[in-house]
Amino acid sequence: MAEAIEIYDDRLRAILRPGASLQELANSAVHSEGPVYFHEDDSVVWSDAHGNRLLHWSPADKMSVLRSPSDYQSGNYRDLEGRLVACSSGLRAIIRREHDGEWKVLVDRYQGKRLNSPNDLVVKSDNTIWFTDPPYGITEPNQGYGGEQEQPGSYVYRFDPASGEIYPVVTDMVRPNGLAFSPDESLLYVSDTAAFNIPGGPHHLRVYEVVDHRHVQNGRVFCVIDPGQPDGLRVDEYGNIFTSSQDSVQVYAPDGTQLGKILIPQTSANLTFGGKERDRLFITAGHSLYAIDLNTRGVQL
Ligand code: MG
């Protein structure tokens, strides 16, 4: 497996599982994104974002279609009750699968105007939903139904499903896309994927200090991602950041040092920790779902 992992800093060795290798679990999606883990049946749900389907994989059943069409569902997560919450690029909304299996729109507007097209989300420990809102579901024909952009920019929002309160927390990025909190939720990392279709646009992660669980401040560039751009990211129990890129999952220490790369045969979009011990990294990349066992555990599933 040594040939598939590039080590730039010895701290990466403690994170890797000796003898573990990248496994391809499924490979027939048009474009895989947004994996989320279900410990109940050791399964992964993810989006075939360009195929407009929601997919399911488990060791017993392999790949199956959970929902089609999925209204261009992209990022997926679970709330504190275990319900699947998701970004719908097509509906331009945050949606939730209720306990009875019905899908419900939780929010699709801010100040009376439609959201752009929510792309990725995380649920904080207070059950608030923090999500990014780039315009890809409007501008990219294979990621949504088109339409007019009504918001003046691409922001990161904080939404409280209990009260319905919604407001932007990050307004100084070009195309915010993936996001994750540090283990103690004192920091918020957000990827900017503007370079995807804006020549010279950013392709980096920014990090912000979280204030009073409600706002962020002092944003700065945390790392620049090459080649390609970052998309989804996750954080492990030590605060290390795992981010997608064109050629690999790149691993960064909390101090910003790049520890190394886990090379992936296709361009990776998103990733999530799972497995019974939360030490298995699931990666959506191109047509496929991959997994690799690690010696560290995720703080976000
Ligand atoms: Mg994304």
Image (cartoon, helix red, strand yellow):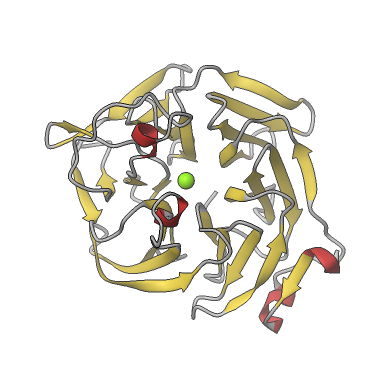
Decide if residue 18 is on the left or right side of residue 100. right
Q: Residue furthest front?
A: 199
Look at the image and tell me whether residue 83 can be seen: no
Q: Position of residue 28 (x, y in %)?
A: 72, 29
Q: Name the residue nearer the viewer: 182 or 244.
A: 244
- Residue drawn 26% across the image and 30% down it: 108
**Would residue 195 be found to the left or right of residue 152 on screen?**
right
Q: Quadrant of residue 59?
A: top right
Q: Nearer the viewer, residue 224 or 185?
A: 224
Q: The N terminus is located in which quarter?
A: bottom right
Q: Position of residue 190 (x, y in %)?
A: 40, 59
Question: Where in the figure is residue 278, as x and y percent of width and height?
Answer: 64, 53
101, above or below 176, in the image: above
Residue 179: x %, y % from top left: 42, 55
Residue 31 visible in the current orientation: yes
Residue at the image point whose x is 57% and y is 26% from the top: 51
